């Protein structure tokens, strides 16, 4: 196993190693034509043939890229790194860098018009062009925010001690009452409701973020990721925990996954759920109940992020024999 391995698959079952790039890779994004990967020690790579061949691109970041997204109205890719910098580029060649002081950036989400980044400094960082960034501290305590999501009409950030806030434009924020006393790790929007998950199996829901309701997740394991399909929600976490929820996250039933790995990421690709986790775990299910492991297994130490970007399913892993596995549409 080597750092920075790239693997592709046409069906999610049979995988082909396309390249070994020499750096741990942490995330992948596409605009529908070009796949971009970011990783440690400033690694940035592009592919125009669904991950078959890759070319290194210049990157101003000297630490690993934590997250990457596409700001459609500005036509720019945005990279959040681990040392307080945000970088943007129209082509992954010419870069503009801003030091925003967002130490240990955690998450990045973009609407067509604006990006929002969060991290352990307790700040919310926003930009409409990917070049100029504004820092907003939400309240006097500035809690750590772990997750951010875009619903199609609003942003939501969630974090420690149930902290959460909403914004329709990323500029003016409403700090809501704590959703729970515990830590929230992730949030999604489904069935007309925000659904947030966190420590010790907590699940809370809210139509607007103003008033939250606690839901029985039927697990006491930490839940690190949540996604919505339009007809259901799925949350995953510690010790292979999987719990399946209704479209709006109000009712949940624990499921059994064929793993005890820590599950860090989950996505719905339009036909199935895909989850990733420690020990290179990558599983798929059409209903969230019956699971199958991809075979052969991906050559990853851990899969930290799984998501769908512009129709492309991407899994990113680090550290160790890290890889980005891209499933073409």
Image (cartoon, rainbow, N blue to C red):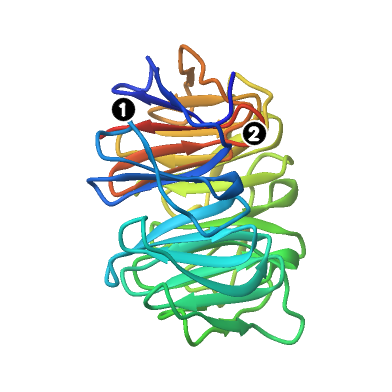
Q: CA distance from mark 2 to mark 1?
A: 33 Å
Q: Which quadrant of the figure has residue 157?
A: bottom right
Residue drawn at (41%, 38%), measured in percent from left and top?
Answer: 314
Q: Residues within 10 Å of mark 1 (few under 14, many from 20)?
A: some
**Disc 2 vs disc 1: which is toward the camera?**
1
Relative horizontal placement of residue 111, taking residue 119 as reference (left or right): left
Give the quadrant of residue 14: top left
Q: Percent position (x, y) of residue 201?
A: 69, 46
Query: Can residue 253 be spotted in the picture?
Result: no
Q: Which disc number belongs to residue 63?
A: none
- Locate the C terminus and report the quarter of the image it occupies: top left
Mark 2 or mark 1, which has the lower sequence index? 1
Query: Camera-side residue: 78 or 144?
Result: 78
Decide: is 298 above or below 91: above
The picture quadrant where one finds residue 307 is top left
Whether residue 152 is visible, yes or no, is: yes
Task: Report the residue that reaches farthest toward the top.
Answer: 296
Q: Position of residue 46 (x, y in %)?
A: 35, 43
Screen quadrant of the N terminus: top right
Provide the secondary structure element on which disc 1 rests.
Answer: loop
Q: Which residue lies under the disc numbered 2?
A: 241
Residue 154 point in image, percent of width and height: 41, 73
Asked if 316 appears above or below 69 in the picture, the reply is: above
Residue drawn at the location 28% of the way across and 52% of the way down: 31
**Residue at horizontal 66 percent and vertical 35 percent from the top:** 319
**Mark linked to residue 52:** 1
């Amino acid at each position: 196993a080597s750092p920075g391995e790239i693997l592709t698959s046409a069906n999610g079952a049979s995988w082909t190693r396309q390249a070994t790039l020499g750096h741990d890779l942490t995330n992948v994004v596409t605009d529908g034509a070009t796949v971009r990967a970011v990783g440690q020690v400033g690694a940035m790579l592009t592919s125009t043939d669904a991950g078959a061949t890759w070319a290194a691109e210049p990157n101003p970041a000297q630490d690993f890229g934590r997250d990457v997204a596409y700001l459609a109205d500005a036509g720019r890719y945005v990279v959040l790194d681990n040392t307080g910098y945000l970088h943007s580029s129209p082509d992954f060649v010419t870069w503009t860098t801003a030091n925003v002081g967002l130490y240990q950036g955690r998450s990045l989400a973009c609407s067509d018009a604006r990006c929002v980044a969060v991290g352990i400094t307790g700040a919310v960082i926003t930009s409409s062009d990917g070049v100029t960034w504004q820092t907003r501290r939400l309240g006097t305590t500035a809690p750590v925010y772990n997750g951010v999501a875009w619903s199609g009409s609003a942003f939501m950030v969630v974090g420690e001690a149930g902290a959460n806030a909403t914004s329709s434009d990323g500029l003016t924020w409403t700090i809501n009452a704590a959703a729970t006393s515990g830590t929230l790790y992730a949030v999604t929007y489904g069935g007309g409701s925000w659904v947030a998950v966190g420590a010790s199996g907590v699940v809370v829901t809210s139509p607007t973020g103003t008033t939250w309701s606690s839901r029985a997740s039927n697990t006491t394991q930490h839940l690190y990721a949540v996604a919505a399909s339009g007809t259901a929600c799925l949350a995953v976490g510690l010790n292979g925990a999987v719990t399946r929820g209704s479209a709006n996250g109000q009712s949940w039933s624990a499921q059994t996954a064929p793993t005890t790995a820590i599950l860090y990421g989950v996505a719905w690709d339009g036909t199935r759920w895909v989850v990733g986790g420690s020990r290179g775990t990558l599983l798929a299910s059409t209903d969230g109940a019956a699971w199958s492991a991809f075979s052969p297994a991906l050559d990853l130490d851990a899969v930290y992020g799984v998501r769908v970007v512009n129709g492309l399913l991407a899994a990113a892993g680090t550290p160790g024999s890290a890889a980005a596995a891209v499933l073409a549409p």
